[in-house]
Image (cartoon, rainbow, N blue to C red):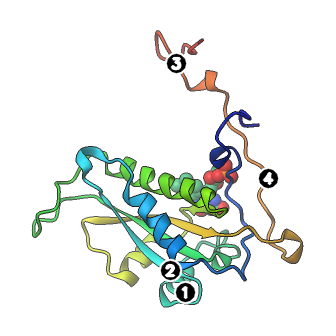
Amino acid sequence: MPNPDLTPLLRDRCSPRVFDPAHRLAEPDLRLLLEAARWAPSAGNSQPWAFLVGVRGDRTHREICQHLSRGNSGWVPRASAVLISVCRIASDPDDDAPAFSDYAQYDVGQAVANLTVQASALGLSVHQFAGFDHDAVTAAFGVPAHWKVTTGVAIGRVGDPTTTDIPERKPSDRKPLSEFVYAGQWGAAYDA
Ligand SMILES: Cc1cc2nc3c(=O)[nH]c(=O)nc-3n(C[C@H](O)[C@H](O)[C@H](O)COP(=O)(O)O)c2cc1C
């Protein structure tokens, strides 16, 4: 169980599988989520992220949903919006954009984390996923070689699990702090 003193935006967050297929994501809310990603920190302010944005019913959403892994094909299409996060993995010799940073993937993760917290603030849920055909998505959207298709980001409102056969995920757990917070030397648990 999370520490109850955590901000509810984090404490109550989870990655649901059962999205409400009737929910429509308001355009201003979608823009706000992308704005949250935009204001993430990044190494040297390199902002090495891009997003493909599909809203249920549009061409981009349909295209993304054609390339899902079997395990994700049942639940992702119900999400109100499905994004693909894309990471700059090399400098583009033809533009003035910041040079490739070794921390690019770290930064893209932070951008999606920002978006996820903003979604919680709007009463929305986010479920990230890696289970899709990255090469097919790269080809379908013409993603250039110096960018790497990274994760899917399903966004929506939680639906009623009794109306679908989609098995909802069990609440997730976490390792205790003692297993990954060290002081003194590697492996020695930090003891406040
Ligand atoms: C990079 C990444 C890839 C993931 N891939 C999948 C996936 O393909 N399918 C899936 O159902 N969940 C996927 N997840 C969700 C994780 O399984 C989930 O975040 C984790 O079990 C913790 O659960 P919680 O988010 O509900 O706390 C992914 C999450 C991340 C961050």
Q: CA distance from mark 3 to mark 4?
A: 29 Å
Earlier residue among tags 1 and 2: 2
Residue 3 higher or lower than 160, as above or below = above
Asked whether disc 1 touches disc 2, contact meaning CB atoms under 8 Å apart, the reply is: yes
Q: Label 3 amino acid?
A: Tyr
Question: Circle 1 sits on which residue?
Answer: 62
Q: Which mark is residue 182?
A: 3
Q: Mark 2 belongs to which amino acid? A: Gly
Between discs 3 and 4, the one toward the N terminus: 4
Pointer 4 or 1: first along the chain:
1
Instruction: Assess whether mark 1 and mark 4 are in contact (beta carbons under 8 angstroms).
Output: no
Q: Which mark is residue 54?
A: 2
10 Å crowding of disc 1: few (<14), some (14-19), many (20+) = some
Percent coordinates x, y for residue 29 in the rendering: 54, 71
Q: Is mark 1 within 8 Å of ligand 1?
A: no
Q: Based on the displayed image, in which of its 4 quarters is residue 96 positioned? A: bottom left
> Which of the two labelled residues, at mark 4 and mark 2, occupies the earlier sequence position?
2
Question: Considering only vertical position in the picture, is 73 above or below 149?
Answer: below
Q: State the separation of the CA atoms marked 4 and 1.
A: 28 Å
Q: Which residue is mark 4?
A: 170
Are the residues at dot 1 and dot 3 in contact (C-beta closer than 8 Å)? no
Q: Quadrant of residue 167?
A: bottom right
Q: Are marks 2 and 3 in contact (CB under 8 Å)?
A: no
Judging from the image, what secondary structure is the residue with disc 1 in?
Answer: helix
Cα–Cα gap, marks 2 and 3: 41 Å
Looking at the image, is mark 2 or mark 3 nearer the viewer?
Answer: 2
Depth check: 35 or 131 in front?
Answer: 35
Q: Quadrant of the N terminus?
A: top right
